Image (cartoon, rainbow, N blue to C red):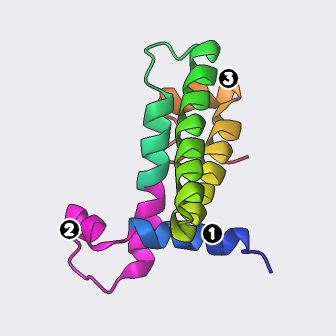
Amino acid sequence: MGISEENIFLMELQLLTSEAMKKHFQWENKDDDKSLFATAQLVFCSQVIESLMESEDCEESDFVDASDDCLQLQYSLLEEARAKNDRKMMIISLARIRIIKTIIRRLGNNERRNRWISGEFVIPPSY
């Protein structure tokens, strides 16, 4: 019996909604997990996108290199988790890889990436 993608994503969001995350945002209503989940997802996506968009002109070759670096880091974390037999970290790493691949796919298109950089999109562009 495998773990569904939805469950992996929820586990990732649960990690992001830890006490440290709540303290970081100084959440007034600590029981309001629904809005915290939504914020956590955007924070993670924006962190990934920031790391992918570090080059000033964001040439396609730079984007591909940054994408590879970002994924390679997560794959190395996954391998470490496998070596330690840490199931929780394996699931988290897989969820992060899935999210990063989605962002890369969406921003891999030059037009979408340029619209993102210009500020036309507030959240990661969808299909």
Mark closest to the chain's N terminus, 3 or 2? 2
Q: Callout 1: few (<14), some (14-19), or many (20+) C-alpha neighbours within 10 Å?
A: many
Q: Which residue is mark 1?
A: 8
Percent from the top left, x then y, of residue 85? 57, 65
Nearest to the observer: residue 71 or residue 50: 71
Mark closest to the chain's N terminus, 2 or 1? 1
The answer to whether residue 125 is seen in the rendering is: no
Q: Which residue is mark 2?
A: 23
**Number of marks present in the image shown:** 3
Disc 2 marks a residue whose amino acid type is Lys
Percent from the top left, x then y, of residue 125? 61, 44
Dot 3: what SS? Answer: helix
Q: Callout 2: few (<14), some (14-19), or many (20+) C-alpha neighbours within 10 Å?
A: few
Marks 2,1: beta carbons within 8 A: no
What residue do we see at 32% from left, 87% from top?
31
Give the spatial CA distance, label 3 vs label 2: 37 Å
Disc 3 marks a residue whose amino acid type is Asn
Q: Which residue is mark 3?
A: 110
Question: Magenta includes 21?
Answer: yes
Disc 1 marks a residue whose amino acid type is Ile
